[in-house]
Image (cartoon, grey):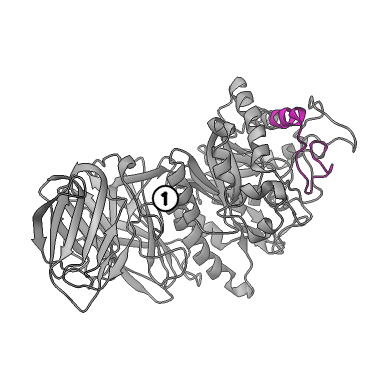
């Protein structure tokens, strides 16, 4: 029996094929490169020219007609530890360091900060909250509330960051409620007391924090109820076991309080790993088993969902595809990536290279290709020992290191964030780009593309190979070719064409099991035998003018002969509407604008090479 391969793809159904570019519309792209050996660090590598000659190497197709999430920003956290080490610098050196991090013209242009509400594991001295009272006492009216601790260093630094980047946004997250609100009376571990008075007091505490920061010139744009709520055994630092049902109870109080206070702060749920860490699963109490790898889903299925504006993720377990899986379940919920720390490698000499490559694959590209609106590292600045800190991580690195002699070292995180923050502006929209690499290390080129509000196109690319690798980029009818050094991270910027208007993708279906991310179709490779077929479901009847079958890097695995048939119901088929022979990476099939929901491609010739389809794009 001949094999029949069915592919249900999240296809790009555009209102027209990419238009022919006007003369001089996008003649060249400018390139910036960082290499793992540090020989090039955000180096301006000049320009690369577009050409009308088709490339002969694997080609990344950038398609502005397919749009995804709107980006909000990139950055880190001014923890208590970060503030302490920055204040070890002279005022002039501190000013220069902040300018280098946040200035949108001469610096990295960091645009989003995640601020602990009270202490985290990265404090210079003892843990604290904004309503600490003697053991055994309570303060339901929050009469002892004060942010005096933050007024000394953290708030001045936030105002300086905002001076250099007026568009700076702030996320806030508590590691622990005040101890008097918790079952163990301690900031370390324990649960929130299950009492309506406590839920009201804790929600009011968070509102007072937002109001107090606003009084000091800092607007809190998003807030989570609890950092890493399933980390039940924090190592000597503040933390809280907060099951989803308790988080929902807090949010049900917090949402109306924010509304009544006329605060526009968006509530984020979860704020933990892509998947639950095995260590956290091992410490799951019997009454929390329903939250295992289902915490954000449980939140969105609770009565609190109407107050939740987004779900936040960390990097310490799982991989970014978990965000696309969640997006398929709850497509209207915004996704944020809010924490990942770099770490010192086993051989410290490898730290820059290891961090550059892992963070690029998983944070810079993996997160953005899987619907995250932000990419945030952990500490903005630390000392050479990874401190100061109380408990917690002893090998963490900051975006910068403040040295004892008063100098500042830019770490790999400075460059990974910079390859986004310097070029992808707030309000930019991620657009489609084919990507051959993965969040693993598969030796290919991984990409993500964005369209800025000013119309410029940004492509961030990473060579997941230790050797130089050539690839091409196609935008409309023009290509450019480029060879990336081994392991390199690059950003390309050019004036993109206007693009075609995409149809609403809400009705399309996608085969999830093999999808790497939401804009990558499920790929397959099979023996190329006459009679083998591939079926595509658009999700509804559309007038598809042409379909492009893309082999990806396997440019020799094109169909040696094919026919195409269409159907409105998947049962009755119009016989051959197109026939032809593929050639190279792209096989373009003219469907003449016939109305159909399904298209079936059937091979008419055999070949020794397999038939590979890595991406499918359709235009109407």
Q: Is 422 situated above or below 261?
A: below
Quadrant assignment for the C terminus: top left
Q: In the displayed image of the protein, which residue is found farthest to the top?
A: 260
Q: Which quadrant does the N terminus fall into?
A: bottom left
How many dots with numbers? 1
Which sits in the foreground, 578 or 260? 578
What residue did someone put label 1 on? 423
Please state the horizontal and vertical placement of residue 418, each as a whole percent of the image: 49, 54
Q: Can you tell which quarter of the image residue 511 is in? A: bottom left
Residue drawn at point x = 21 percent, y = 53 percent:
476
**Label 1 neighbourhood size at 10 Å, few (<14), some (14-19), many (20+)?**
many
Q: Is residue 458 left or right of residue 148?
A: left
- Nearest to the observer: residue 616 or residue 468: 616
Q: In the rendered image, which quarter is residue 221 located in?
A: top right
In this view of the protein, which residue sits in the foreground, 565 or 379? 565
Q: Left of 73 or right of it: where is 159?
A: right
Q: Does residue 178 show up?
A: yes
Please, what secondary structure does the residue beneath circle 1 have?
A: loop
In reply to whether residue 194 is colored magenta, the answer given is: yes
In the image, residue 437 lies in the stretch drawn in magenta: no
**Is 592 on the left or on the right of 527, as rendered?**
left
| Residue 620 placement, left or right of 392 | left
Relative vertical location of residue 257 with respect to residue 545 in this rendering, above or below = above
The residues colored magenta run 180-205
Counting from the top left corner in percent of width and height, residue 469 is at 35, 73
Q: Looking at the picture, how far across and down is residue 40, in whole percent?
A: 46, 67
Q: Is residue 25 visible?
A: no
Please identify the residue farthest to the front as the structure is shown. 1
Q: Residue at x 17, y 63 (%)?
A: 602
| Above or below for 345 versus 30 | below
Choose top left, top right, bottom left or bottom right for residue 226.
top right
């Amino acid at each position: 029996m001949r094999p029949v391969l069915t592919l249900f793809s999240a296809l790009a159904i555009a209102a027209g094929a990419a238009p022919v570019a006007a003369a001089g519309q996008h003649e060249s792209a400018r390139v910036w490169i960082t290499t793992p050996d540090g020989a090039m660090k955000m180096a301006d590598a000049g320009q690369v020219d577009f050409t009308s000659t088709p490339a002969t190497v694997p080609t990344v197709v950038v398609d502005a007609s397919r749009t995804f999430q709107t980006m909000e920003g990139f950055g880190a956290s001014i923890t208590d530890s970060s503030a302490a080490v920055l204040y070890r610098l002279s005022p002039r050196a501190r000013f220069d360091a902040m300018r280098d991090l946040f200035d949108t013209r001469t610096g990295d242009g960091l645009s989003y900060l995640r601020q602990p509400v009270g202490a985290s594991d990265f404090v210079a001295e003892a843990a604290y909250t904004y309503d600490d009272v003697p053991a055994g006492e309570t303060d339901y009216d929050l009469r002892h509330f004060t942010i005096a601790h933050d007024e000394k260093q953290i708030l001045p630094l936030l105002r300086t960051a905002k001076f250099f980047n007026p568009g700076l946004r702030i996320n806030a997250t508590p590691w622990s409620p005040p101890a008097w609100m918790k079952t163990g009376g301690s900031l370390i571990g324990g649960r929130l007391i299950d009492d309506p008075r406590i839920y009201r007091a804790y929600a009011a505490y968070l509102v007072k924090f937002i109001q107090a920061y606003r009084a000091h010139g800092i607007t809190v744009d998003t807030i989570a109820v609890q950092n890493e709520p399933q980390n039940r055994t924090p190592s000597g630092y503040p933390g809280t076991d907060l099951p989803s049902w308790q988080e929902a109870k807090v949010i049900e109080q917090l949402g109306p309080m924010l509304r009544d206070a006329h605060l526009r702060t968006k509530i984020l749920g979860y704020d933990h790993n892509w998947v639950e860490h095995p260590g956290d699963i091992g410490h799951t109490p019997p009454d929390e088993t329903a939250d295992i790898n289902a915490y954000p889903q449980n939140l969105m299925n609770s009565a609190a969902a109407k107050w939740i504006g987004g779900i936040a993720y960390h990097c310490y377990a799982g991989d970014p595809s978990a965000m696309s899986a969640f997006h398929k379940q709850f497509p209207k919920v915004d996704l944020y990536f809010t924490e990942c720390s770099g770490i010192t490698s086993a051989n410290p000499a490898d730290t820059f290279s290891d961090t550059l490559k892992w963070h690029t694959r998983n944070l810079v590209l993996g997160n953005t290709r899987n619907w995250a609106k932000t990419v945030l590292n952990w500490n903005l600045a630390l000392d050479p020992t990874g401190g100061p800190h109380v408990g917690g991580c002893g090998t963490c690195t900051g975006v910068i290191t403040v040295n004892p002699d008063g100098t500042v070292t830019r770490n790999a995180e400075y460059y990974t964030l910079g390859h986004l923050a310097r070029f992808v502006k707030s309000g930019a929209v991620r657009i489609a780009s084919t990507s051959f690499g993965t969040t693993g290390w598969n030796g290919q080129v991984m990409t993500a593309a964005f369209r800025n509000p000013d119309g410029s196109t940004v492509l961030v690319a990473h060579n997941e190979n230790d050797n130089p690798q050539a690839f091409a980029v196609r935008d409309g009818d023009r290509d450019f070719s480029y060879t990336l050094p081994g392991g390199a991270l690059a950003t390309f910027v050019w004036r993109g064409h206007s693009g075609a208007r995409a149809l609403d993708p809400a009705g399309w279906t996608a085969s999830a099991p093999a999808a790497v991310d939401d804009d990558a179709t499920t790929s397959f490779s099979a023996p190329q035998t006459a009679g083998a077929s591939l079926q595509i479901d658009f999700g509804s009847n559309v007038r598809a003018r042409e379909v492009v079958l893309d082999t990806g890097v396997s440019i020799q695995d094109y169909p040696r002969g094919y026919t195409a048939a269409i159907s409105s119901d998947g049962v009755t088929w119009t016989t051959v509407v197109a026939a032809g022979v593929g050639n190279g990476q792209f096989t373009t099939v003219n469907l003449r604008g016939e109305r159909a929901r399904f298209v079936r491609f059937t091979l008419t010739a055999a070949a020794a090479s397999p038939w590979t389809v890595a991406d499918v794009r359709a235009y109407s």
